[in-house]
Amino acid sequence: MDDLSRALDENLLSDLECPVCMQYMVPPIQLCTNGHNICSRCTESVRRCPTCRVEFSEIRNVALENIARRQKYPCANRQSGCLELLSIEHIAEHNAVCVYGKIKCPLHLLQMCSWNVLKSNLKEHVNAAHSDYFVEVSSFYIPQLSETLMIVTCFGEFSLTTKRYTMADCRVLFS
Ligand SMILES: [Zn+2]
Ligand SMILES: [Zn+2]
Ligand SMILES: [Zn+2]
Ligand SMILES: [Zn+2]
């Protein structure tokens, strides 16, 4: 058992998982008339309780909401080695920047590569697999769309120079 497992109450964490989306429930947490919980994201798409099939009530599980607010949660990339513990309102924020998270290779936009790599290994992958297109620059750089394909990295961010996709696509992927 590692230190992280010792610090976490796994049973409590599984009680805090939504039975529909299997993610940790963010308050408000609603109840069905038999007392099963569901997260606020899922009440919009699911009308009946997945456990007992009755309809959800407007009643909230305030005790569990309070526990959820105090609880520290492991990062979604825990299996890949992330040891961060986060409060419920910081999970999404952390997931967006976690270096243990996997992202798609920039060239998936052009269907030229289907690799998923750890964010921290993306540069290594691009350098090894796509060295023909890879350019690293060390000053602030705004990529220009051009006929020549280049993968440009600057300050840890990656962008593509290609007319086949709009700048917006590139920004979404790499920021
Ligand atoms: Zn849910
Ligand atoms: Zn139920
Ligand atoms: Zn993480
Ligand atoms: Zn690739």
Image (tube, helix red, strand yellow):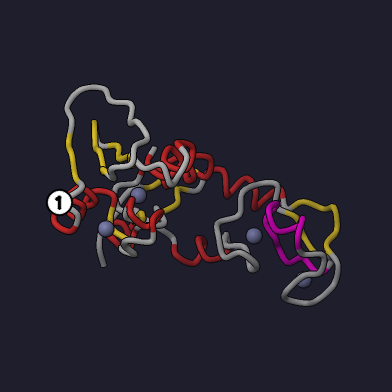
In which quarter of the view is residue 49 placed?
Answer: bottom right
Measured as percent of width and height from the top left, residue 105 is found at 32, 55
Q: Residue 38 colored magenta? A: yes
Specify the farthest residue to the bottom: 52
Q: Which residues are magenta?
A: 34-45
Q: Residue at x 65, y 48 (%)?
A: 65
Is residue 79 shown left or right of residue 44?
left
User: Residue drawn at (38%, 47%), measured in percent from left and top?
Assistant: 85
**Image coords of residue 166 (percent x, y):** 47, 40
Specify the farthest residue to the top. Answer: 140
Q: Secondary structure at mark 1?
A: loop
| Total marks in image | 1
Residue name at image x 61 percent, y 54 percent: 25
Quadrant position of residue 78: bottom left
* Residue 20, position as x, y percentages in the image: 65, 67
Q: Quadrant of residue 76?
A: bottom left
Q: Which amino acid type is shown beneath numbered disc 1?
A: Ser
Q: Residue at x 17, y 27 (%)?
A: 138
Residue 153's place in the image compared with 77, above or below, is: above
Q: Quadrant of the C terminus?
A: top left
Q: Is the residue indicated by label 1 positioned so its CB lies within 8 Å of ligand 4?
A: no
The percent position of residue 144, horizontal first and vertical second, equals 35, 31
- Tell which of 97 and 25 is nearer to you: 97
Residue 49 lies in the magenta stretch: no
Instruction: Give above or below for 84 relative to 129.
Output: above
| Label 1 Cα crowd, 10 Å radius (few <14 / some 14-19 / many 20+) | few
Residue at the spot of label 1: 131
Q: Is 85 on the left or on the right of 151, as rendered?
A: right
Q: Dividing the image into 4 quarters, which one contains the N terminus?
A: bottom left
